[in-house]
Image (cartoon, rainbow, N blue to C red):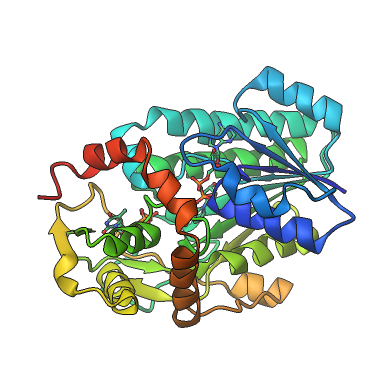
Amino acid sequence: MKILVTGGAGFIGGNFVHYMVNKYPEDEIVNLDLLTYAGNLETLKPVEDKPNYRFVRGDIADRTFIFDLFEKEQFDVVINFAAESHVDRSITGPQIFVQTNVLGTTTLLDASRAFGVKRYHQVSTDEVYGDLPLDRPDLFFTEETPLHTSSPYSSSKASADLFVLAYHRTFGLPVTVSRCSNNYGPYQFPEKLIPLMIARALADEKLPVYGEGLNVRDWLHVYDHCVAIDLIVRNGKVGEVYNIGGHNERTNIEVVKTILKALGKPESLIEHVEDRKGHDRRYAIDPQKLENELGWKPVYTFDSGIPETIQWYLDNREWWEHIISGEYQDYFKEMYGEKLQ
Ligand code: NAD
Ligand code: TYD
């Protein structure tokens, strides 16, 4: 099989490329990535010389380029990770989220139709369901939960999901969609909560916690996400949505304190800053469909995955120190300048 993975120089796509290249030596994995600020070829170093792996630089929203590529390569499977993925950036600049997440997805869908792709998989997020109240721990997102987005990011992802499902209903394109909860693990860009807090704590810098820090996220190790996507692409039912999550809910303040404790740093580094606009309160996935239909079970709990992840950032300083030494400095000033005294 020839598989196109888009966004494979990013966090989850990069982990997925590692997983697939090693697990399926008989398959050909083509990684298409624009290498935006979030894309990093260093992440692909461990697989770049493998015979079943290739990298192509390009934009999923560039129609001419995408149609040429699909015509030349004749992919069997397309798995779309490529996206603008950070909620805070979508608040300061929503337009690129429409461009990449919506137009990019519809461009891939059109090319998949035109060149007879046998399976198109859309990597989506639980954020399309909006949020749950903090005082109702009995509520979870199921695949039937209505879409009810809060941020420009989640709105662009929900829009893309609707196009994917419409291309199945209208044109019979063989699609699946997965909606996963928050991921953590190796190679995550240090703008997201966990790597940001690790990097700043190690430098004895203040840790910016939005509001009270009582918002809840449902954390899944990226490895378990990769296994789930592989299962859905191979065995999932066409036209279906699958939620992915492992029941690992934590408040943000709990996560930050866990990181500080593991690194032996004082809680006095925590600085409560102005809350994110429209901040979703709680995400929590009901993964029963994936477990019952496809037999998926996560191997990590948050308690087993987080020490291993912290150790990875300690062992791979070069990977993230390289990132935070560049234009990232300007990003931090722009995002947190007024928030962090
Ligand atoms: P990321 O920001 O780390 O990586 C995104 C990658 O896409 C980067 O390599 C970037 O260069 C590439 N890219 C951006 N625009 C592109 C374009 N126009 N053409 C080609 N490539 C482009 O994101 P991530 O955290 O790895 O997320 C991957 C996917 O998983 C996204 O679709 C995201 O919505 C979804 N998701 C993320 C999480 C999470 O917790 N991070 C959870 C659930 C779902
Ligand atoms: P993030 O990693 O951006 O993921 P998402 O917004 O997609 O859930 O943020 C996770 C949680 O951490 C979210 O509730 C916002 C919060 N947060 C902070 O408190 N401080 C920060 O500096 C960041 C980046 C996030």
Residue 143 vertical placement versus 174 (above, below): below
The count of marks equals 0
196 relative to 234 in the view: left or right: left
Give the residue at the far left of this rendering.
341
Query: Can you give x and y, in whole percent of width and height, for residue 31 in the image?
Result: 70, 41
Return the residue nearer the eye: 336 or 94.
Answer: 336
Q: Quadrant of ligand 2?
A: bottom left
Residue 100 vertical placement versus 25 (above, below): above
Residue 242 vertical placement versus 330 (above, below): below
Choose top left, top right, bottom left or bottom right for residue 270. bottom left
Task: State whether residue 297 appears in this view.
Answer: yes
Q: Which residue is drawn at the image coordinates 86% and 52% (left, top)?
A: 27
Q: Which residue is drawn at the image coordinates 71% and 29% (left, top)?
A: 110
Q: Which residue is drawn at the image coordinates 19% and 74% (left, top)?
A: 266
Choose top left, top right, bottom left or bottom right for residue 118. top right
Choose top left, top right, bottom left or bottom right for residue 338. top left
173 relative to 241 in the view: left or right: right
Task: State whether residue 141 appears in this view.
Answer: no
Return the residue nearer the eye: 158 or 67.
Answer: 67
Query: Can you give x and y, in whole percent of width and height, for residue 69 in the image?
Result: 77, 27
Query: Can you give x and y, in whole percent of width and height, for residue 185 in the image?
Result: 51, 64
Query: Can you give x and y, in whole percent of width and height, for residue 47 in the image?
Result: 72, 52
268 relative to 294 in the view: left or right: left
